[in-house]
Image (tube, helix red, strand yellow):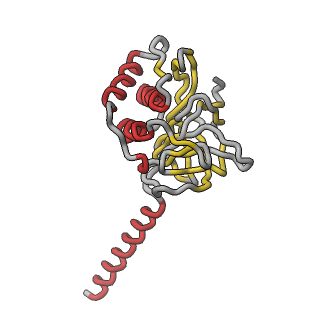
Amino acid sequence: MRKAIIASGIAIALLATVGMARADSLYVGSSYTYPIHIVDNGVQKTVGGGSIDPSTLNGTLLKYMYCINPDLEISAGTTYANTIVTTNGVIGGTPGHGVTNAGQIAWLLGNYGTGGQGANAYALQVAIWHEEDSTITMDTFHSTAQEIGLYNSYLSSLGGNTGNVSDFLWITPQNSCGQIFQEQVGAVPEPPTLLLLGTCLAVFAALRLKARQAKG
């Protein structure tokens, strides 16, 4: 796979507005985990994946972003201005399709989601792909002992656990022509509405304090 291209997935962001689908602007970062060695339905493949950094959604920095499907491609350093975002595990546009084992993927992200690249991101990315498609596994011949160990421990800890799908954004990058690209997974900081509320409360508290000092 060319280094300018990232393998497919779906972006998930923490603390999103539940249940809404909208057109957003996703900027795909230029740093990502490569090479990732997998076995896809018996075929060895070398692909790229998360965490894809620094990526932003509507100008807000994502803490991390991972892929769901390694068979699709997306260009690094590119903005997809008509991106589709949901909080119900649905990707691929409207009506789209539900992500297989979205709850299990949400649990993996909630427990092991991390920005940057390295063994943790490598192992998590393959674990996400495996939950989406059980025919995908880590290529243990080309992966390191640390990557293999982490991958096995993540899946072992997952067991039958599921996370809250609505805690994440499920993102389908799409351009203005309606062409759909790789779906991703990523976590964001607090939503702007919560940040605005926090700012307003802080200002209100400061004004009250100032008023009390003036009376005193």
Q: Is residue 119 left or right of residue 52?
A: left
Give the quadrant of the N terminus: top right
User: Which residue lies most toward the top here?
Assistant: 141
Provide residue 117's location: percent of width, then percent of height. Answer: 48, 31
**Residue 132: percent from left, percent from top:** 48, 32
Q: Is residue 114 visible?
A: no
Q: Dividing the picture into quarters, in which one does residue 190 lie?
A: bottom left
Give residue 163's quadrant in the image. Answer: top left
Where residue 195 appears, as percent x and y from the top left, is 43, 62
**In this view of the protein, which residue sits in the foreground, 211 or 190?**
190
Residue shown at the point (49%, 22%) measured from the top left: 135
Is 130 or 124 nearer to us in this picture? 130
Q: Report which quarter residue 110 is drawn in.
A: top left
Q: Quadrant of the C terminus?
A: bottom left
Residue 73 location (% of width, % of height): 64, 32
Q: Residue at x 55, y 25 (%)?
A: 34
Q: Residue furthest left?
A: 216
Task: Return the residue found at the far bottom.
Answer: 215
User: Horizontally, is 173 left or right of 130 in the view?
Assistant: right
Q: Is residue 150 above or below residue 85?
A: above
Residue at image point 41% right, 71% down: 200
Visible in this render: residue 209? yes
Q: How many marks?
A: 0
Give above or below for 49 relative to 88: above
Say if 163 sits above or below 130 in the image: below
Q: Which residue is found at the position 49% from the left and 13% from the top? A: 142
